[in-house]
Amino acid sequence: MNVLALNASPKSKGSASAFYSSLLRLFLTGRKVKTHPLHGAWDHKKALALLLWTDAVVISVPAYVGAAPAHVTAFLERAELLCQKKQCHFKLHAISNCGFIEEYQNELHLRIYEA
């Protein structure tokens, strides 16, 4: 199984999303795992190409005002267009992190990935 772990924090260093992406590797023994940054639109092209390789995508992303950052939403829209043209066979998983302790703070954010 091929797994693509996307660190979708806009921060280039020291983010919780980067920590979760690297921690994920410890739980995915026996699988081919590639990690890729998704800090902004400049990372979209390579990440989109990797979608055709992967069986599972795990996107680790912060919740900003209860939703995904704009560059992540733009990536998801581009990924949808790509998968309409080419056959993508991956399952999407999301790790949502924010500074709130109440779990419902992530509810809207996770619904974005369901859609």
Image (cartoon, rainbow, N blue to C red):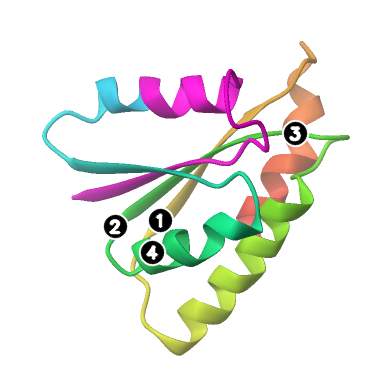
Query: What residue is pinned by disc 3?
Result: 63
Q: Earlier in the sequence, mark 3 or mark 4?
A: 4
Residue 112 in the image: above or below residue 33: below
Separation (CA) of disc 1 from disc 3: 21 Å
Q: Nearer the viewer, mark 1 or mark 3?
A: 3
Q: Earlier in the sequence, mark 4 or mark 1?
A: 4
How many other residues sit within 10 Å of disc 1, few (<14), some (14-19) or many (≥20)? few
Query: What residue is pinned by disc 1?
Result: 91
Q: Which residues are magenta?
A: 1-23
Give the structural element (helix, strand or loop) at label 1.
Answer: strand
69 vs 33, left or right, is right
Task: Looking at this view, name the residue that lies furthest to the left.
Answer: 30
Q: Earlier in the sequence, mark 3 or mark 2?
A: 2
Query: What residue is pinned by disc 2?
Result: 55
Q: Measuring from the top left, give residue 73's x and y in whole percent.
A: 71, 57
Query: What residue is pinned by disc 4?
Result: 51
Give the structural element (helix, strand or loop) at label 3.
Answer: loop
